[in-house]
Amino acid sequence: MIIEPRTRGFICLTSHPTGCAQNVQNQIDYIRQRPTENGPKNVLVIGASTGFGLASRITSAYGSKASTIGVFFEKPPTKGRPASPGWYNSAAFEKQAHKDGLYAKSINGDAFSNEIKTQTLELIKEDLGKIDMLIYSLASPVRTHPDTGERFKSVLKPIGDTFTNNTVDFHTGEVKEISIEPSSDDDIENTIAVMGGEDWQMWIDLLKSENVLAEDFKTVAYSYIGPSLTEAVYRKGTIGAAKDDLEATAFKITDSLKEINGKGYVSVNKALVTQASSAIPVIPLYISLLYKVMKEEGLHEGCIEQIERLFNERLYAEDLQLDDAGRIRIDDWEMRDDIQAKVLKLWQEATTETLPNIGDLEGYKNDFFNLFGFNVDGVNYDKDVDEIVAIPGLQE
């Protein structure tokens, strides 16, 4: 079939298997040029099919020849209906990994559930014995608690006061003011239940109890802080409360793993176009201005560049530098004072008319469509493609 992008708001309803495969290959090629001797060898990535999770799996496999198990929740293709992009990403990764002699298997299902945790545990026992790295990169908006059955839904709201600021519709380029009403206590609790650290802790507790964590085991979850521009709605809002909980969990995990010298970390990453970030008001305008500044300074990074730097210059370097709150800061280039000063100046000048010149809205839009396999260099989108693509190592 001929597959074209169909959008609704901040999501794309279609994805392109060839474009997704090319995106994955580009990331593999990048990491092949930057191998490391000190990286992980047996890796579990929870949330492995897109964004930072996918980049972590690729960096592990092609940076240090690690065996990888990926857990994700993606929609498979049916005749006449493409799969979700994460399905095609995972299929492309595993096809290439197997061709290159690398172990790679995947489990598709709800990572919050006890069933998927148990299935993953059994696969580790059977094939790997123990893992020395767990990446936790879930970005689900909802969670059903595996023990109580209670369903939680996260929200993006400020805490205390109404938030008002500018945003941009990246499809039309219109800059407009938006207001978001403050959260309730239930909103905060629900968002923490979905995006906080409880599930991460559950994974670690299960794997530890079954003795499948290797000596010097590391686990990393991903977070974001961001600038003062987004602080009220993000870091000091409901999502920020969840991130605080996630970061506190890292210390609990480290305490629980002392006997194997295990460590839990949170890595604060750069603002990037992801399926999750595109849904956050204000963020598209901020990112379009940030991209402009960082590209001009030669500091721009995508997911794969961020994660390669995280692995090689932080996690597996001789001296791991942490901030005052015990976090890894791979957002250091974004948060440089000179970068933020330039972004703030542009923010004050941003209108529908000025944004095409002072921002990088085209770069934002291109990255958005890249997430779904569109606008990828070297791909012929007029060519008929088979939407039915299998993931070679998918476990049933």
Image: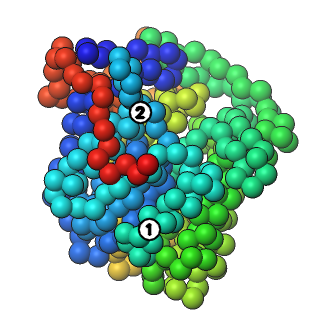
Residue ID at (59%, 27%): 281
Disc 2: which residue: 76
Q: Distance between the residues labelled 2 and 1?
A: 24 Å
Question: Above or below — where is 87 with respect to 145?
Answer: above
The x, y position of residue 389, in whole percent, is 29, 33
Farthest right residue in view? 185
**Element at label 2:** loop
- Specify whether 277 is left or right of 98: right
Q: Which color scheme did the rendering employ for the protein?
A: rainbow
The mark tally for this picture is 2
Amino acid at circle 2? Pro
**Element at label 1:** helix
The x, y position of residue 209, in whole percent, is 61, 77
Amino acid at circle 1? Ile
Mark 2 neighbour class, 10 Å CA radius: few under 14, some 14 to 19, many 20 or more: some
Identify which residue, 175 or 194, lies in the foreground. 194
Residue ID at (57%, 15%): 176
Disc number placed over residue 124 in the picture, else none: 1
Question: Above or below — where is 129 with respect to 154?
Answer: below
Identify which residue, 329 or 130, lies in the foreground. 130
The x, y position of residue 339, in whole percent, is 42, 44
Q: In terms of sequence position, does the residue under pointer 2 or pointer 1 come before the other? A: 2
Q: Is residue 28 visible?
A: yes
Mark 1 neighbour class, 10 Å CA radius: few under 14, some 14 to 19, many 20 or more: many
Residue ID at (39%, 59%): 69
Question: Above or below — where is 247 with respect to 156?
Answer: below
Farthest bottom residue in view? 259
Q: Can residue 356 be seen in this view?
A: no
The quadrant where residue 97 appears: bottom left
Q: In which quarter of the image is the N terminus?
A: top left
Residue ID at (44%, 22%): 12
The quadrant where residue 130 appears: bottom left
